[in-house]
Protein backbone atom coordinates (compact mmCIF):
# COMPACT_ATOMS: atom_id res chain seq x y z
CA UNK A 1 0.00 0.00 0.00
CA UNK A 2 1.39 3.41 -1.00
CA UNK A 3 2.05 6.09 1.58
CA UNK A 4 0.26 9.44 1.34
CA UNK A 5 3.55 11.03 0.24
CA UNK A 6 3.91 8.62 -2.67
CA UNK A 7 0.25 9.16 -3.60
CA UNK A 8 0.95 12.93 -3.71
CA UNK A 9 4.01 12.41 -5.93
CA UNK A 10 2.00 10.11 -8.19
CA UNK A 11 -0.78 12.66 -8.50
CA UNK A 12 1.63 15.39 -9.52
CA UNK A 13 3.24 13.28 -12.23
CA UNK A 14 0.03 11.70 -13.57
CA UNK A 15 -2.18 14.23 -15.36
CA UNK A 16 -4.75 11.73 -16.52
CA UNK A 17 -5.36 9.35 -13.60
CA UNK A 18 -5.66 11.18 -10.24
CA UNK A 19 -4.83 8.98 -7.25
CA UNK A 20 -7.87 7.85 -5.30
CA UNK A 21 -7.76 7.74 -1.52
CA UNK A 22 -10.80 5.83 -0.34
CA UNK A 23 -9.94 5.81 3.33
CA UNK A 24 -10.68 9.52 3.84
CA UNK A 25 -14.29 10.77 4.27
CA UNK A 26 -15.49 12.70 1.25
CA UNK A 27 -17.51 15.45 2.94
CA UNK A 28 -17.91 18.34 0.56
CA UNK A 29 -17.48 16.16 -2.55
CA UNK A 30 -20.41 15.83 -4.96
CA UNK A 31 -22.54 12.79 -4.10
CA UNK A 32 -21.49 9.54 -5.77
CA UNK A 33 -17.85 10.55 -6.31
CA UNK A 34 -14.77 9.12 -4.67
CA UNK A 35 -12.35 11.85 -3.72
CA UNK A 36 -9.12 12.04 -5.70
CA UNK A 37 -6.03 13.45 -4.03
CA UNK A 38 -6.65 16.68 -5.88
CA UNK A 39 -10.16 16.97 -4.48
CA UNK A 40 -8.93 16.04 -1.01
CA UNK A 41 -6.36 18.83 -1.06
CA UNK A 42 -8.93 21.34 -2.26
CA UNK A 43 -11.43 20.16 0.33
CA UNK A 44 -8.87 20.59 3.11
CA UNK A 45 -8.14 24.11 1.95
CA UNK A 46 -11.86 24.98 1.96
CA UNK A 47 -12.23 23.47 5.41
CA UNK A 48 -9.34 25.63 6.63
CA UNK A 49 -11.23 28.61 5.24
CA UNK A 50 -14.29 27.71 7.28
CA UNK A 51 -16.27 26.03 4.48
CA UNK A 52 -16.95 29.23 2.50
CA UNK A 53 -20.14 29.66 0.41
CA UNK A 54 -18.82 28.84 -3.06
CA UNK A 55 -18.30 25.70 -5.12
CA UNK A 56 -15.01 24.52 -6.62
CA UNK A 57 -15.01 22.39 -9.77
CA UNK A 58 -11.88 20.57 -10.91
CA UNK A 59 -10.82 19.82 -14.47
CA UNK A 60 -11.77 16.14 -14.02
CA UNK A 61 -15.38 16.92 -13.13
CA UNK A 62 -15.06 16.64 -9.34
CA UNK A 63 -16.88 19.32 -7.40
CA UNK A 64 -16.27 20.39 -3.81
CA UNK A 65 -18.94 22.36 -1.97
CA UNK A 66 -20.23 22.82 1.56
CA UNK A 67 -23.32 24.80 0.59
CA UNK A 68 -26.36 23.94 -1.54
CA UNK A 69 -27.38 27.51 -2.39
CA UNK A 70 -27.91 27.59 -6.20
CA UNK A 71 -26.77 31.21 -6.53
CA UNK A 72 -23.38 30.66 -4.91
CA UNK A 73 -20.34 31.38 -7.14
CA UNK A 74 -18.62 28.47 -8.85
CA UNK A 75 -14.84 28.40 -9.27
CA UNK A 76 -13.45 26.24 -12.07
CA UNK A 77 -9.78 25.16 -11.82
CA UNK A 78 -8.67 24.01 -15.25
CA UNK A 79 -5.61 21.82 -14.47
CA UNK A 80 -3.55 20.23 -11.71
CA UNK A 81 -0.61 22.63 -12.05
CA UNK A 82 -2.90 25.56 -11.28
CA UNK A 83 -4.34 23.75 -8.27
CA UNK A 84 -0.90 23.03 -6.81
CA UNK A 85 0.25 26.62 -7.24
CA UNK A 86 -2.98 27.80 -5.64
CA UNK A 87 -2.50 25.51 -2.64
CA UNK A 88 1.07 26.75 -2.12
CA UNK A 89 0.43 30.49 -2.51
CA UNK A 90 -3.26 31.39 -2.94
CA UNK A 91 -2.87 35.10 -2.11
CA UNK A 92 -0.65 35.66 -5.14
CA UNK A 93 -1.20 32.72 -7.51
CA UNK A 94 -4.97 33.09 -7.77
CA UNK A 95 -4.62 36.48 -9.47
CA UNK A 96 -2.17 35.27 -12.10
CA UNK A 97 -4.18 32.11 -12.75
CA UNK A 98 -7.41 34.07 -13.13
CA UNK A 99 -5.75 36.57 -15.47
CA UNK A 100 -4.41 33.71 -17.62
CA UNK A 101 -7.80 31.99 -17.78
CA UNK A 102 -6.58 28.97 -15.80
CA UNK A 103 -9.25 29.77 -13.20
CA UNK A 104 -12.78 30.84 -14.07
CA UNK A 105 -15.42 32.23 -11.71
CA UNK A 106 -19.07 31.76 -12.62
CA UNK A 107 -21.49 34.04 -10.81
CA UNK A 108 -20.49 37.15 -8.91
CA UNK A 109 -16.73 37.62 -8.82
CA UNK A 110 -17.11 40.25 -6.09
CA UNK A 111 -19.25 37.90 -3.97
CA UNK A 112 -16.65 35.15 -4.35
CA UNK A 113 -13.79 37.41 -3.26
CA UNK A 114 -15.82 38.69 -0.31
CA UNK A 115 -16.14 35.08 0.87
CA UNK A 116 -12.38 34.64 0.54
CA UNK A 117 -11.63 37.82 2.49
CA UNK A 118 -13.98 36.77 5.28
CA UNK A 119 -12.00 33.53 5.54
CA UNK A 120 -8.61 35.27 5.47
CA UNK A 121 -7.97 35.05 9.21
CA UNK A 122 -8.32 31.26 9.18
CA UNK A 123 -6.11 30.97 6.11
CA UNK A 124 -3.43 33.09 7.77
CA UNK A 125 -3.53 30.97 10.94
CA UNK A 126 -2.64 27.91 8.85
CA UNK A 127 0.15 29.66 6.95
CA UNK A 128 -1.68 30.21 3.66
CA UNK A 129 -1.01 33.96 3.89
CA UNK A 130 2.31 35.21 5.24
CA UNK A 131 2.02 38.95 5.84
CA UNK A 132 5.54 39.09 7.29
CA UNK A 133 7.02 37.87 3.99
CA UNK A 134 5.09 40.44 1.97
CA UNK A 135 5.95 43.18 4.47
CA UNK A 136 9.61 42.42 3.86
CA UNK A 137 9.12 42.64 0.09
CA UNK A 138 7.36 45.99 0.52
CA UNK A 139 10.25 47.34 2.59
CA UNK A 140 12.68 46.28 -0.14
CA UNK A 141 10.64 48.32 -2.67
CA UNK A 142 10.98 51.69 -0.92
CA UNK A 143 9.38 54.68 -2.63
CA UNK A 144 12.42 56.70 -3.57
CA UNK A 145 12.05 59.57 -6.03
CA UNK A 146 12.94 57.30 -8.96
CA UNK A 147 10.92 54.30 -7.81
CA UNK A 148 7.87 56.45 -7.05
CA UNK A 149 7.88 57.72 -10.63
CA UNK A 150 8.23 54.16 -11.96
CA UNK A 151 5.34 52.98 -9.78
CA UNK A 152 3.09 55.81 -10.96
CA UNK A 153 3.90 55.14 -14.60
CA UNK A 154 3.08 51.43 -14.12
CA UNK A 155 -0.50 52.24 -13.14
CA UNK A 156 -1.52 55.75 -14.15
CA UNK A 157 0.25 56.11 -17.48
CA UNK A 158 -1.65 53.32 -19.21
CA UNK A 159 -3.22 55.98 -21.40
CA UNK A 160 -5.90 58.55 -20.73
CA UNK A 161 -8.12 56.88 -23.32
CA UNK A 162 -8.28 53.76 -21.13
CA UNK A 163 -9.45 55.60 -18.02
CA UNK A 164 -11.90 57.75 -19.97
CA UNK A 165 -13.84 54.58 -20.80
CA UNK A 166 -14.93 53.88 -17.22
CA UNK A 167 -14.26 56.85 -14.92
CA UNK A 168 -16.68 59.77 -14.59
CA UNK A 169 -16.41 62.60 -17.12
CA UNK A 170 -14.13 64.63 -14.81
CA UNK A 171 -11.69 61.69 -14.52
CA UNK A 172 -11.73 61.34 -10.75
CA UNK A 173 -10.01 58.12 -9.70
CA UNK A 174 -10.68 58.28 -5.95
CA UNK A 175 -13.56 57.46 -3.62
CA UNK A 176 -16.78 59.32 -4.39
CA UNK A 177 -19.30 60.51 -1.78
CA UNK A 178 -22.92 59.43 -2.26
CA UNK A 179 -25.24 61.98 -0.61
CA UNK A 180 -28.22 59.73 -1.32
CA UNK A 181 -28.45 55.98 -2.00
CA UNK A 182 -29.61 56.58 -5.58
CA UNK A 183 -26.96 59.17 -6.48
CA UNK A 184 -25.04 58.43 -9.68
CA UNK A 185 -21.26 58.41 -10.01
CA UNK A 186 -21.07 61.87 -11.61
CA UNK A 187 -23.10 63.45 -8.80
CA UNK A 188 -21.19 61.54 -6.13
CA UNK A 189 -17.77 62.66 -7.37
CA UNK A 190 -18.86 66.32 -7.32
CA UNK A 191 -20.27 65.77 -3.82
CA UNK A 192 -16.90 64.35 -2.72
CA UNK A 193 -15.05 67.44 -3.95
CA UNK A 194 -17.54 69.74 -2.22
CA UNK A 195 -17.21 67.75 1.01
CA UNK A 196 -13.44 68.23 0.96
CA UNK A 197 -13.77 71.95 0.25
CA UNK A 198 -16.31 72.40 3.06
CA UNK A 199 -14.08 70.56 5.50
CA UNK A 200 -11.19 72.87 4.56
CA UNK A 201 -13.53 75.94 4.73
CA UNK A 202 -11.97 77.45 1.62
CA UNK A 203 -12.53 81.16 1.00
CA UNK A 204 -12.06 83.25 -2.17
CA UNK A 205 -8.55 84.60 -2.53
CA UNK A 206 -6.87 81.82 -0.55
CA UNK A 207 -4.09 79.62 -1.90
CA UNK A 208 -4.08 75.81 -1.90
CA UNK A 209 -1.37 73.26 -2.66
CA UNK A 210 -2.42 69.79 -3.77
CA UNK A 211 -0.09 66.78 -3.55
CA UNK A 212 -0.93 64.12 -6.12
CA UNK A 213 -3.60 65.75 -8.26
CA UNK A 214 -4.51 62.95 -10.69
CA UNK A 215 -6.11 64.40 -13.82
CA UNK A 216 -6.63 67.70 -12.04
CA UNK A 217 -10.39 67.80 -11.40
CA UNK A 218 -10.10 68.67 -7.70
CA UNK A 219 -7.85 71.66 -8.37
CA UNK A 220 -10.18 73.00 -11.07
CA UNK A 221 -13.22 72.49 -8.82
CA UNK A 222 -11.62 74.42 -5.97
CA UNK A 223 -10.63 77.27 -8.26
CA UNK A 224 -13.98 77.51 -10.08
CA UNK A 225 -16.41 77.09 -7.19
CA UNK A 226 -14.45 78.37 -4.18
CA UNK A 227 -12.40 81.18 -5.70
CA UNK A 228 -8.97 79.93 -4.61
CA UNK A 229 -5.68 79.68 -6.48
CA UNK A 230 -4.25 76.17 -6.64
CA UNK A 231 -0.81 74.74 -7.25
CA UNK A 232 -1.09 71.00 -7.91
CA UNK A 233 1.79 68.50 -8.01
CA UNK A 234 1.91 65.14 -9.80
CA UNK A 235 4.65 62.93 -11.26
CA UNK A 236 2.46 61.35 -13.96
CA UNK A 237 3.28 63.12 -17.22
CA UNK A 238 0.11 61.95 -18.98
CA UNK A 239 -2.10 63.16 -16.16
CA UNK A 240 -0.36 66.54 -15.93
CA UNK A 241 -0.65 67.15 -19.67
CA UNK A 242 -4.35 66.23 -19.58
CA UNK A 243 -4.95 68.51 -16.57
CA UNK A 244 -3.25 71.47 -18.21
CA UNK A 245 -5.29 71.06 -21.38
CA UNK A 246 -8.54 70.91 -19.39
CA UNK A 247 -7.64 73.95 -17.30
CA UNK A 248 -6.89 75.95 -20.44
CA UNK A 249 -10.10 74.80 -22.16
CA UNK A 250 -12.14 75.76 -19.09
CA UNK A 251 -10.47 79.17 -18.70
CA UNK A 252 -8.87 78.26 -15.38
CA UNK A 253 -5.21 78.24 -16.35
CA UNK A 254 -4.62 81.57 -14.58
CA UNK A 255 -5.95 80.14 -11.30
CA UNK A 256 -4.56 76.60 -11.43
CA UNK A 257 -0.92 75.64 -11.95
CA UNK A 258 -0.09 71.98 -12.56
CA UNK A 259 3.49 71.05 -11.66
CA UNK A 260 5.09 67.83 -12.90
CA UNK A 261 7.13 67.09 -9.79
CA UNK A 262 7.27 64.96 -6.66
CA UNK A 263 5.47 66.07 -3.50
CA UNK A 264 8.85 66.22 -1.74
CA UNK A 265 9.76 69.22 -3.90
CA UNK A 266 6.75 71.34 -2.95
CA UNK A 267 7.82 74.85 -2.05
CA UNK A 268 6.11 78.12 -1.14
CA UNK A 269 3.45 78.93 1.48
CA UNK A 270 -0.27 78.18 1.19
CA UNK A 271 -3.42 78.59 3.25
CA UNK A 272 -4.40 74.95 2.80
CA UNK A 273 -2.87 71.59 1.90
CA UNK A 274 -4.89 68.78 0.32
CA UNK A 275 -3.99 65.27 -0.78
CA UNK A 276 -6.63 62.94 -2.25
CA UNK A 277 -5.53 59.35 -2.79
CA UNK A 278 -1.77 59.85 -2.61
CA UNK A 279 -0.74 58.74 0.89
CA UNK A 280 -1.19 55.06 0.02
CA UNK A 281 1.61 55.54 -2.55
CA UNK A 282 3.99 57.41 -0.23
CA UNK A 283 5.22 54.47 1.85
CA UNK A 284 5.37 54.47 5.62
CA UNK A 285 9.12 55.15 5.64
CA UNK A 286 8.36 58.56 4.11
CA UNK A 287 5.53 59.76 6.37
CA UNK A 288 7.88 61.94 8.40
CA UNK A 289 9.20 63.45 5.19
CA UNK A 290 5.67 64.27 4.04
CA UNK A 291 4.94 65.86 7.43
CA UNK A 292 7.99 68.09 7.04
CA UNK A 293 6.78 69.19 3.60
CA UNK A 294 3.32 70.07 4.90
CA UNK A 295 4.66 71.97 7.91
CA UNK A 296 7.01 74.13 5.89
CA UNK A 297 4.30 75.12 3.40
CA UNK A 298 1.56 75.98 5.92
CA UNK A 299 1.46 79.24 7.95
CA UNK A 300 0.11 79.28 11.50
CA UNK A 301 -3.48 79.64 10.26
CA UNK A 302 -3.00 76.78 7.79
CA UNK A 303 -5.06 73.61 7.64
CA UNK A 304 -5.02 70.47 5.55
CA UNK A 305 -6.84 67.31 4.58
CA UNK A 306 -5.54 63.86 3.66
CA UNK A 307 -7.87 61.34 2.00
CA UNK A 308 -6.43 57.82 1.76
CA UNK A 309 -7.10 54.12 1.61
CA UNK A 310 -6.24 52.55 4.97
CA UNK A 311 -6.66 49.64 7.33
CA UNK A 312 -7.90 49.03 10.87
CA UNK A 313 -4.70 47.18 11.76
CA UNK A 314 -1.30 46.99 10.03
CA UNK A 315 -1.05 44.75 6.97
CA UNK A 316 0.51 45.12 3.53
CA UNK A 317 -1.42 45.62 0.32
CA UNK A 318 -2.87 42.40 -1.09
CA UNK A 319 0.27 40.86 -2.69
CA UNK A 320 -1.09 40.28 -6.21
CA UNK A 321 -2.49 43.82 -6.42
CA UNK A 322 0.75 45.26 -5.07
CA UNK A 323 2.83 43.32 -7.60
CA UNK A 324 0.65 43.51 -10.71
CA UNK A 325 -1.49 46.64 -10.30
CA UNK A 326 -0.22 49.07 -7.64
CA UNK A 327 3.52 48.56 -7.00
CA UNK A 328 4.82 50.34 -3.92
CA UNK A 329 1.35 50.84 -2.38
CA UNK A 330 0.74 50.57 1.36
CA UNK A 331 -2.57 51.31 3.13
CA UNK A 332 -1.86 52.81 6.59
CA UNK A 333 -3.75 52.53 9.84
CA UNK A 334 -4.88 55.66 11.66
CA UNK A 335 -2.07 55.14 14.16
CA UNK A 336 0.48 54.94 11.36
CA UNK A 337 -0.94 58.08 9.75
CA UNK A 338 -0.13 59.94 12.95
CA UNK A 339 3.52 59.65 11.92
CA UNK A 340 2.67 62.44 9.46
CA UNK A 341 0.98 64.66 12.07
CA UNK A 342 2.50 64.06 15.51
CA UNK A 343 6.15 65.07 14.87
CA UNK A 344 4.93 68.42 13.52
CA UNK A 345 2.43 69.00 16.32
CA UNK A 346 -0.52 69.16 13.93
CA UNK A 347 -3.96 69.12 15.55
CA UNK A 348 -6.30 66.47 14.14
CA UNK A 349 -9.72 68.13 13.87
CA UNK A 350 -11.88 65.53 12.16
CA UNK A 351 -11.67 61.87 11.13
CA UNK A 352 -14.23 60.25 8.84
CA UNK A 353 -14.33 56.76 7.36
CA UNK A 354 -15.96 56.56 3.89
CA UNK A 355 -15.42 52.80 3.44
CA UNK A 356 -18.88 51.99 2.08
CA UNK A 357 -18.75 54.99 -0.25
CA UNK A 358 -15.63 53.50 -1.83
CA UNK A 359 -17.30 50.10 -2.18
CA UNK A 360 -20.15 51.80 -4.04
CA UNK A 361 -17.68 53.80 -6.17
CA UNK A 362 -15.91 50.62 -7.20
CA UNK A 363 -19.20 48.95 -8.10
CA UNK A 364 -19.89 51.84 -10.49
CA UNK A 365 -16.39 51.59 -11.97
CA UNK A 366 -16.66 47.83 -12.43
CA UNK A 367 -20.03 48.14 -14.20
CA UNK A 368 -18.63 50.79 -16.55
CA UNK A 369 -15.49 48.72 -17.10
CA UNK A 370 -17.58 45.71 -18.12
CA UNK A 371 -19.59 47.83 -20.55
CA UNK A 372 -16.33 48.95 -22.17
CA UNK A 373 -14.54 45.60 -21.90
CA UNK A 374 -14.52 44.87 -25.64
CA UNK A 375 -12.89 48.21 -26.45
CA UNK A 376 -10.37 47.68 -23.61
CA UNK A 377 -9.61 44.21 -24.98
CA UNK A 378 -8.83 45.77 -28.36
CA UNK A 379 -6.57 48.37 -26.71
CA UNK A 380 -4.66 45.77 -24.67
CA UNK A 381 -5.56 42.06 -24.57
CA UNK A 382 -7.76 39.52 -22.79
CA UNK A 383 -5.29 39.05 -19.94
CA UNK A 384 -5.32 42.79 -19.22
CA UNK A 385 -9.13 42.82 -19.12
CA UNK A 386 -9.19 39.92 -16.67
CA UNK A 387 -6.50 41.48 -14.47
CA UNK A 388 -8.37 44.74 -14.14
CA UNK A 389 -11.73 43.04 -13.66
CA UNK A 390 -10.21 41.10 -10.77
CA UNK A 391 -8.60 44.24 -9.34
CA UNK A 392 -11.85 46.25 -9.39
CA UNK A 393 -14.00 43.39 -8.07
CA UNK A 394 -11.43 42.52 -5.41
CA UNK A 395 -11.20 46.13 -4.28
CA UNK A 396 -14.98 46.39 -3.96
CA UNK A 397 -14.94 43.18 -1.92
CA UNK A 398 -12.19 44.54 0.34
CA UNK A 399 -14.22 47.63 1.24
CA UNK A 400 -17.49 45.69 1.59
CA UNK A 401 -15.91 43.27 4.06
CA UNK A 402 -14.01 45.90 6.06
CA UNK A 403 -10.63 44.57 4.94
CA UNK A 404 -9.90 48.10 3.65
CA UNK A 405 -10.97 51.51 4.94
CA UNK A 406 -11.12 55.01 3.45
CA UNK A 407 -9.98 57.73 5.84
CA UNK A 408 -10.38 61.49 5.55
CA UNK A 409 -8.38 63.34 8.19
CA UNK A 410 -8.70 67.10 8.63
CA UNK A 411 -5.86 68.78 10.53
CA UNK A 412 -4.51 72.24 11.35
CA UNK A 413 -1.37 73.91 12.64
CA UNK A 414 -1.23 73.77 16.45
CA UNK A 415 -1.83 77.50 17.10
CA UNK A 416 -4.80 77.75 14.73
CA UNK A 417 -7.86 78.62 16.82
CA UNK A 418 -9.95 79.52 13.79
CA UNK A 419 -11.87 76.27 13.92
CA UNK A 420 -15.66 75.87 13.88
CA UNK A 421 -17.47 74.99 17.11
CA UNK A 422 -19.90 72.70 15.29
CA UNK A 423 -20.01 70.55 12.15
CA UNK A 424 -22.81 72.58 10.60
CA UNK A 425 -20.52 73.84 7.83
CA UNK A 426 -20.23 70.29 6.46
CA UNK A 427 -23.88 70.16 5.47
CA UNK A 428 -25.03 71.28 2.03
CA UNK A 429 -26.48 74.79 2.18
CA UNK A 430 -24.78 75.66 5.47
Image (cartoon, helix red, strand yellow):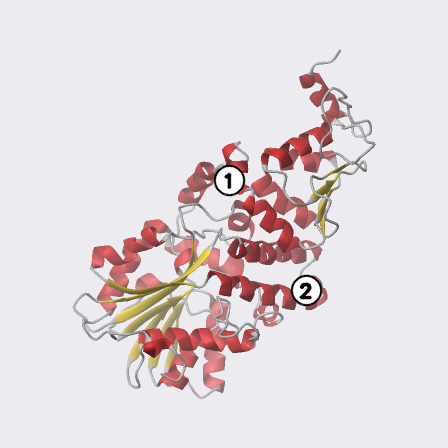
Q: Quadrant of residue 138?
A: top left
Toward the left, the furthest residue is: 415
Q: Residue at x 73, y 28 (%)?
A: 26
Give the structural element (helix, strand or loop) at label 1: helix
Locate residue 203 relative to residue 68 in the image: left or right.
left
SS assignment at label 2? helix
Label 1, on which residue? 121
The image position of residue 396, as x and y in percent, is 56, 58
Image x and y of residue 14, in percent: 78, 26
**Label 2 or label 1, whichever comes before in sequence order:** 1
Q: Is residue 39 left or right of residue 248?
A: right
Mark 2 vs mark 1: give the one in front. 1
Residue designated by label 2: 370
Looking at the rendering, in which quadrant would you find the N terminus?
top right
Q: Is residue 9 above or below residue 174?
A: above
Of residues 251 and 330, the one drawn nearer to the viewer in this rendering: 330
Numbered mark located on residue 330 in the image: none
Task: Locate residue 240, reporting x and y percent.
Answer: 46, 72
Residue occupying the point 22% across, 55% down: 343
Position of the C terminus by quadrant: bottom left
| C-alpha separation, residue under disc 2 versus residue under disc 1 | 31 Å
- The residue depicted at 56 percent of the width and 50 percent of the height is 324
Amino acid sequence: MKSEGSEFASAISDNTSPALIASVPDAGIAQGQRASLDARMMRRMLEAMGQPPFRVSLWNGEEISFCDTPSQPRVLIRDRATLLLLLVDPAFRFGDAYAAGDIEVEGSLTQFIEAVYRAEAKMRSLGFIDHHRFSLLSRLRRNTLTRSRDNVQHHYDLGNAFYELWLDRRMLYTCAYFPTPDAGLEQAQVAKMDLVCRKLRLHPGETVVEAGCGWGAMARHMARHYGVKVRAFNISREQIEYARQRACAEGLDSRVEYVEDDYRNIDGRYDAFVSIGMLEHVGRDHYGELGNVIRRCLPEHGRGLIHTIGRNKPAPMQPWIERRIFPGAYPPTLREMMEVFEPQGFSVLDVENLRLHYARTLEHWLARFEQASERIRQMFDERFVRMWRLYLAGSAAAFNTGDMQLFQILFACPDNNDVPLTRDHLHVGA
